[in-house]
Image (spheres, rainbow, N blue to C red):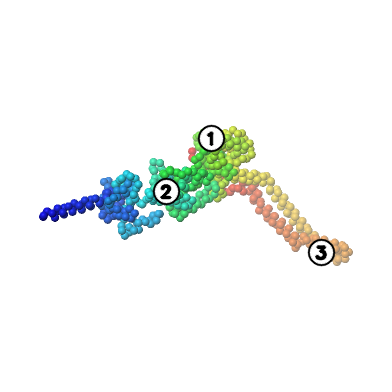
Amino acid sequence: MVWIVPIIAMLAGLWMIYDTWSKLGPEITLNMASAEGITPEKTTIRVLDVNIGKVTAVRLSPDNKSVRVTARLDADTDSLLSVDSRFWVVKPRIDKTGVSGLGTLLSGAYIQLQPGKSPERKTEFQALASAPVTGPDVPGLRIRLNGQNVRVLSVADPVLYQGFQVGRVETAHFDPATRQMNYQLFIEQPYDRLVTDTSRFWVASGLQISATAEGLKIRTGSLETLVSGGVAFDVPRGRPLGGRVANMTPFNLYPDQDSINEQYSGRHIDYLAFFDESVRGLTVGAPVEYRGLRIGTVQALPYPLKSQKRWVLGERRIPVLLRIEPDRIESFTQSRPNDWQQEIERAIGEGLNARLKTGSLLTGAVFVDLDFDGKLRERHTASVDGLPVLPTTSGGLAQIETKVIALLNKLNGLKLDTTLNTADQTLAEGQRTLSEVRRLTQRLDRLLAQPDTQQLPQDLRGTLQELQQTLNGVSPQSPAYQQLQQSLSTLNQLLREMRPVVRTLDETPNALLFNRSARDPEPKGATP
């Protein structure tokens, strides 16, 4: 009977051991960059704010470059551990998405578990540096973006459609092999149907200022994009809406909305245009228009000719590569490139040529304009380096300068010095005539004042009085005389002031257009 008590105690102990062992959950290992805020036997693991486990040990990794955290979960939690399960440390955080983790100021940090959906199980995980933007259970669409020479975006930056937020940037990393920024975007339902195969994505900055041939453009976004930026997307104007895309479909990321039109990837026909005037203000990407309708883009300036191995400063013409893009005009979308080339050759025979026009006086940007000048040519188009040549003519300020120079040449041939000398002599004769009239008036006054004149017949006296009234009209005290004298003085002063101008025009006919003291502008040549 004495052994009954020890046997019962031993059985009770074995039962307690079995009960404890049966209630133990799986043991997991988390790899972290730092153990900040993690304390063994105190830091808990939670799912939807429910404690399901506790950290049991914290130690360094074998290479001493990271931290390995061991945790024991509760029983019946095996279904939470999938290959796509994610762990991260929740602690007070302030970022662009807002303020989070304030409750940990009193309770301390804890580890958040986001269960996965994969049937494959796993017990060792790499903890995330921060909380994921969206969960795996949130319905929506994920797409990939690739971009070069674009503004760097950050995780949690907004995704906008016509200024309305429809998603977030989930991941962002740089690929050194391709030298591209790769992003993963999440578009929430029901806005995922807005993404089609014709959609285009670009960086949406809060404030964008650009100076082009169309003038000065200023675009402003929301306060959030002003601070951190974001991604915007839409279907370009004139393009069909397209069909819906599958999950993880790749798209290109453009630097801005204007780059979508400039980076044209459709059908094109290349032409060479040789301009014999200054191309200042013309840049690569400038539009090629036909009567205000854009039909192409400036592709290269200057174009490197294969037949010319080096740039010669004495070369009067500057080669420019123009890319005609038929798909920019909806009515010609069904035409073939050969049809367009034949149409352009026919138009060249009817007088089609290219000229430079000023697009904006504020920015000084110019563009290439195609129009007819009425001069018939041969339909056979010349070619250089295998490219057809588009005829050119001077336009804009060059035409105005030519006309002004021709006018100044005509003025120079008028011999204005002789004309001014004749005008001076005429004024002097006029002044002498007025002096003679004034003396004659004084003599008539004295004659009428004599007694003999008073005794003349009444008719003669009336005639003399009428003559006196007429002469009084041109007397120095009369308004007509004073107005004539003032006009002659003004004309005399004007002629004196015009003498230096006439002399300058005679010496330098183009002095009205250019500053005589400044040197003539010299065009910049390309580096040999």
- Give the residue type at disc 2: Gly
Name the residue nearer the viewer: 426 or 276.
Answer: 276
Q: Position of residue 270 (x, y in %)?
A: 53, 37
Q: Residues within 10 Å of mark 3 (few under 14, many from 20)?
A: few
The image quarter in which residue 179 lies: top left
Q: Are marks 2 and 3 in contact (CB under 8 Å)?
A: no
- Residue 15 visible in image: yes
How far apart marks 3 and 1 lie (CA) works out to 96 Å
SS category of the residue bearing label 2: strand
Question: Label 3 amino acid?
Answer: Arg
| Disc 1 secondary structure class | strand
Could you say where residue 115 lies in the image, as x and y percent from the top left?
34, 49
**Residue 346 x %, y %:** 60, 35
**Residue 140: mark in rendering:** 2
User: Closer to the camera, 344 or 144?
Assistant: 144
Residue located farthest toward the front when viewing the structure as drawn: 1
Report whether residue 65 is seen. Answer: no
Q: Earlier in the sequence, mark 2 or mark 3?
A: 2
Q: Which residue is mark 3?
A: 446
How many angstroms separate mark 1 from mark 2 (CA)? 49 Å
In the figure, 357 relative to 102: above or below? above
Asked whether the residues under the numbered discs 3 and 1 touch, taking CB atoms below 8 Å apart as contact, a structural biologist would say: no
Q: Earlier in the sequence, mark 1 or mark 2?
A: 2
